[in-house]
Amino acid sequence: MTPLMLILTAASAALPSGAERPTVTVAVAGPPGAAGRIDAALRAAPDPVRYHAVELPRPVPPPPAAVPGGALAEARQAYVRADFGRCLASLGGADAATDALGGAGDSLTASRLLLWRAACALGDGDPRGAREAAESLAVLGLPPPPDVGSVSQEVEALLVQVRASPRPDVPVRIESSAPGAELVIDGRPQRCATPCTLPLPAGAHVVRVEADGYEPLVRRIAAAPPSVQVRLDLALASPEVAAAQWAARYGPGAEPDTARSVRLLSTALRAPRLLLFSVDEGRTLRVRAALVVDGAVAARAERVDVDPGQLEAAVRGLASDVLVRGRVLEPAPALQQRPEFWVAVGVAAAIAAGTTAVVATRIVKTEIHF
Amino acid sequence: MSAARAGLGAMLGMGLLLGACVQVREVELTFGDEGEGLDGFMCRDPSGAPILTRLQDGAGQMQPAALVLDFIRLGGLPGCRSGQVVSWCVDHPCAPIAGHRACVSTQFSPVTGLDRPQLRASIQQTMDAMKGTLVTGDAPDEFVLVRLVGTAQSCAEVEQRPDGTLPPFDEPKLVGCVYSCPVLLDALEKNLFLGFDTLTDLCEQGVRVCAAGDLHWQPIEL
């Protein structure tokens, strides 16, 4: 029986013939301590792979405002001192407002920039510049900022006049290299995703296109009748951008093992083979595993009602399951297909036959004496 | 590697089991309570001299005799009487089994002048003196005829040759011959009786036939 027991306790999965041990990146979404236990369990597992544990991306703080609040305060003080040149210089270039909208989507800052630009330009004797700023405020659909009460009546009258001017809508079709990309126009998220056609007031707008796994793209467009078509080519996201996207979308509280999430995570972690464990804590544990190979979910498995003390065993079983089903590992051949099995059977049969022969046939030696 | 080790262990275990299951049986050669089986050593030559006197040297001293035990394969199961055996061996390859010949040396007492009962007693005494002597440790496990030949030759002269054949006995030096019925030694329950069928003392010819390699009758060369 010993040879048979040796066969039965052998490894349960194997590498494809001639393959090197692959590296599998392991990430864990779950309660504190779970990642450490899972990492230790996998290191002790007999699977012929190298497990490389990594932490999930953490939320990234929002980028600083394109226009610091101090610049606006300085422009306002210059306006009060009737130093309109200084005011305009403090507000930056003419694109500062659209930069604020396209970058952080900061519509309040953008509307304040345009308000003070209109006010300072009018004070500086530049009615055309003031009108352009007021036009931008109206075309971008930005509400007047709270400090509109601090500007002169002429400025207020200009804003009202410009806002009341008729402005035709222009159909704008936006396409992107990443289908289904989300659109943010003039700082406002849109309901439709690319390819998408939207009616926009004639004039300059800021379009921001975002898609998982792609670098966000900001483009200024001019909506001019009768229609406009815009094609935006997005670059693949760097791991850092992908990490920020994943943390923002699938961080704490979200389902981390959806197909989109694990695909993005695979990019964020630079992991061609990613094994994501999700541990839901309760009286018992629910442990899920998703294997992502080259950005696509190759296999999933789940264990429910796992005793907290048996987490390691459940994790080893799940890892083995998904690695085999995801074809990272080959399943162990059936017992009867392994040569060692037949060697063991032969030895066992020989022992049985020998024992039977010995028991059935007694060997007799005869000594002859005088 | 582990399977090979396990296989080796299994074979070792089988060896031990086999060793433990070997049954050693002991068979004693006997010539009858009264030595009645010793007639084959009491034959006389045509001149009337006991053939045992062939052991005497020129000074009348008895030289050692070799008692040669052979197991003769008969290729079947003939009857027990000498005529049946000889007749059987005419057309069957009767021959001693090479590799099983055993030989012990012994010393007979002088036999000159002894009458028949005295001669029998003397020979029986010699045989009794050898009681317990191991002749062979592993008799063949098949039907054989057991033959004990006495000769003035030495054991060295009659032992198996390097080529595996058995040298024939030197007939003028034969001093006796006895044999058993065909027997399966590994199943023998009692002692093995050795005897010699003859109704007369002048039985040297029978001794020649008995000691012949193929148990064939041969005429006496006078």
Image (cartoon, rainbow, N blue to C red):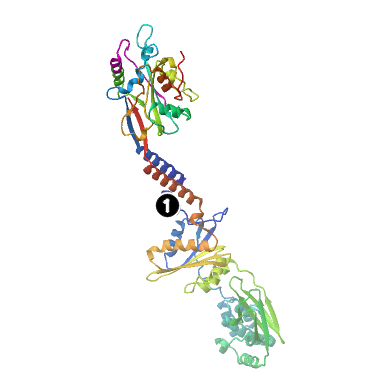
User: How many badges with numbers are in the image?
Assistant: 1
Mark 1 Cα-neighbour bin, 10 Å: few <14, some 14–19, many ≥20: few
Q: Extreme left residue here?
A: B33
Magenta span contains residue A177: no
Seen in the picture, residue B96 relative to A122 is either above or below; the reply is above
Seen in the picture, residue B76 relative to B212 is either above or below; the reply is below
Find the magenta span and give its range.
Answer: B100-120
Magenta span contains residue B102: yes
Image point (47%, 63%), residue name: A318
The image quadrant that residue A209 belongs to is: bottom right
Residue A119 at x, y percent in the picture: 62, 86
Image point (45%, 16%), residue name: B220
Residue B212 visible in the picture = yes
Residue A35 at x, y percent in the picture: 45, 63
Q: Extreme front residue here?
A: B199
Residue A61 at x, y percent in the picture: 52, 72
Residue for badge 1 = A5
Q: Extreme right residue here?
A: A226
The image quadrant that residue A80 belongs to is: bottom right
Residue B130 at x, y percent in the picture: 31, 21
Position of residue B12 in the picture relative to residue A66 (left or right): left
The amino acid type, in three-letter code, at marker 1 is Met
